[in-house]
Image (tube, rainbow, N blue to C red):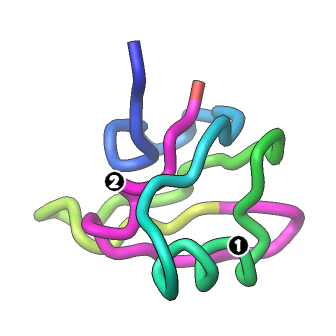
Amino acid sequence: MERSLKELKPGEKAVVTKIKGEGAVRRRLMDMGITSGVEVQVRKVAPLGDPIEVNIRGYELTFRKSEAENIIVE
């Protein structure tokens, strides 16, 4: 079953398996350090689910729900 970063709850850790999307969206995520095999931990999710704050490679990033849907984890 494929899960996106959007589906994780605060405190959960997962490993990125795939980045969906194409062109600029995908390139931007990869430039931010989101690559296959990297561990990501969800720190906080705003009350309405947007944005999502994560720890990755020792730093914090914030994603919109629409961006988090493109990051597939296991």
Query: Which element type, helix, strand or loop, lies under badge 1?
Result: helix
**What separation in Å lies between label 1 and label 2 (alpha carbons)?**
14 Å
> Going by the image, does 22 lie left or right of 32?
left
Q: Total number of numbered labels?
A: 2
Q: Which residues are magenta?
A: 55-73
Q: In the displayed structure, would residue 4 be above or below residue 19?
A: above
Residue that appears at 46% across and 70% down? 22
Q: Which mark is residue 69?
A: 2
Kind of residue at disc 1 = Met
Query: Which element type, helix, strand or loop, lies under badge 2?
Result: loop
Mark 1 vs 2: CB contact within 8 A? no
Residue that appears at 33% across and 38% down? 7
Q: In the displayed structure, would residue 57 be above or below residue 3?
A: below
Identify the image quadrant of residue 32: bottom right
Q: Magenta stretch containing residue 23, yes or no?
A: no
Relative image position of residue 46 (x, y in whole percent): 26, 67
Mark toward the start of the polypeptide (1 vs 2): 1
Give the class, few, some or many, for how many residues have Cα within 10 Å of label 2's Cα (few <14, many ≥20): some
Relative image position of residue 51 (x, y in whole percent): 32, 73
Q: In the displayed structure, would residue 5 be above or below residue 25?
A: above
Asked whether 21 or 41 is in front, the reply is: 21
Relative image position of residue 70 (x, y in whole percent): 41, 56
- Mark 1 highlights which residue? 30
Kind of residue at disc 2 = Glu
Residue that lies at the very extreme toward the left in this rendered image: 48
Q: Which mark is residue 65?
A: none
Residue that lies at the very extreme toward the front in this rendered image: 23
Q: Magenta stretch containing residue 68, yes or no?
A: yes
Asked whether 60 or 20 is in front, the reply is: 20
Relative image position of residue 57 (x, y in whole percent): 87, 63
Residue that appears at 55% across and 56% down? 43
> Going by the image, does 46 lie left or right of 48?
right
